[in-house]
Image (tube, rainbow, N blue to C red):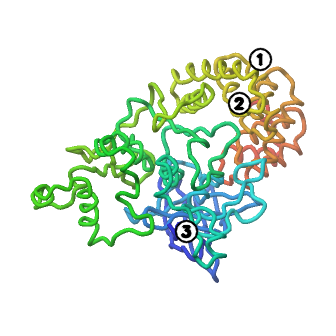
Amino acid sequence: MAQASGPASDGFIAADFEHAASGIHYRITEEAGKVWLSYQREDFARQLDGREELKYFLGSGRRGRTYLFERDGYWFESPINWYAKKQVWDMTPHYLEAREMPLTLPVDPGCLHCHASGAAGALPDARNHYAGAPFATGGITCEACHGDGSAHVASGGKARMLNLDALEPVQRDSVCLNCHLEGQAGVNRLGKKIEDFRPGENLFDYALYFVYRSENGSGGRATSQYEALLKSACKRKSGDKLTCTTCHDPHGSPPEEKRVEFYRQRCLGCHSGAAFAKNHHAENRDCTACHMARPPSNDIAHEQVTDHWIRKRVSQERLPLATSGELVTVGGMAASDRDLGVAYAQMAARGDEQAGMRAMALLRRAEAETNGAAGDHELHAQLGFLEQIDGKSAEAAEEYKRALAADEFDALAAGDLALIEVRERNVREAIKLWSSVVEHDPTQVKAGMNLALTECATGDREGAERVLARVVEFSPDDQEARRFEAEMKSGGKGCLAR
């Protein structure tokens, strides 16, 4: 944990990797104490050549590592990752088959909260826009788990830091779960941000996590051990006595040659009968070999999931990931119509049509119950999206306007409202909305393209060229933007055709 992040030069791992699907050759090199990511494609029709200075690394290297770079105050993750289990470089998760380079992968405070100390709060206009460095100290320090240590330091160690064992179980478990709980959907409580959680508090006062009721254990997700553990006989019989630190020491891991015996002793802490300890599979002391499978992960390439369901007989086959059905909260926490509705809306965005219907009903009810849900931009933005895909443009526009009244930088609401305004021939209003999105959040490439097309179609070719230049600056491998930019520079007249 103490090595989970830091300056890129301290965590340098050389890379020389060619990605077959995109044809891009990536390299990570160190030059005079600086670390660089370079990328080239020699295909004449899609030539690419550039590099970025990598400032920080994330990931201890035990499972993997990625790097961060900055442009104009916006921070991004490298498009390639080091996967330690397979000892290979490959594309970042979800982009293994990408034919274009993803260079606008935003670094948000929630990510930094779990990999670094003193994570900075993002500026209000974009989740990856920071006034300075994204974090103060590399790695996870004592305060991440034991709270403010100023009194402890001032007293020369006499004043004790937070004793986790003295906390109520939900507060104790929250310390681990604020970084080791994922779920199918995560929903921040109204007015709360997960990165504001502090040790000693109840994580579920900040966020709720949802899974499909039909899910098998962890659902094959790499960071969902707790969901599986809750279903295990070990947890159900032990109750609050069993927690993460029952088996895991957060201050260090046993060396490889001692791992089997270390974890066997953790099992024997409960299965303590003398005869059992002596005779239960004396020929194979590795309890996990039979009871904790390690199938491939569903969401992170080249990674495995240690299945904490802890069943009698296990398979090493990949666990199926549920993609539809009824959502329930992890841990049985009570969820409001608003929170459950936002969770279903997240599932609808991934293609679950039934989830969209449920989300709309729940969010409409939540809106009515809270007298319009003033200030809840997420509720209005999600409801607007659902209304829009249901063909109810007027209702969607009103929801998007309410979302923007609550948060003027809500890119989803502004970008989708602009589409409605264009269809209603309110072109000036659409240009105004898209311009704000593009100015404040360069990851919104689609909004940039829509703005450039609209400005070109209305005769503002100079404005369109400026927008395209910004899109290509941040996304140099976006082929649609590059083709359009080339047409504009050559005097082509393809605006309306697009």
Q: Return the residue nearer the eye: 271 or 439.
A: 271
Residue located beneath label 1 in the image: 394
In this rendering, position of residue 484 left or right of residue 41: right
In this rendering, position of residue 122 left or right of residue 359: right
Real-space CA distance between mark 1 and mark 2, rounded to the nearest whole angstrom? 14 Å
Measuring from the top left, give residue 447's x and y in whole percent. Answer: 74, 39
Which of labels 1 and 2 is toward the front? 2
Residue located beneath label 3 in the image: 27
* First along the sequence among labels 1 and 3: 3
Residue located beneath label 2 in the image: 381
In the current view of this chain or complex, which residue is farthest to the bottom? 32
* First along the sequence among labels 1 and 2: 2
What amino acid type should be assigned to the residue bearing mark 2?
Ala
Label 2 Cα neighbours within 10 Å, binned few <14 / some 14-19 / many ≥20: many
| Residue drawn at 25 percent across, 55 percent down | 288
Real-space CA distance between mark 1 and mark 3, rounded to the nearest whole angstrom? 49 Å
Can you see residue 291?
yes
In the picture, the quarter occupied by the C terminus is top right
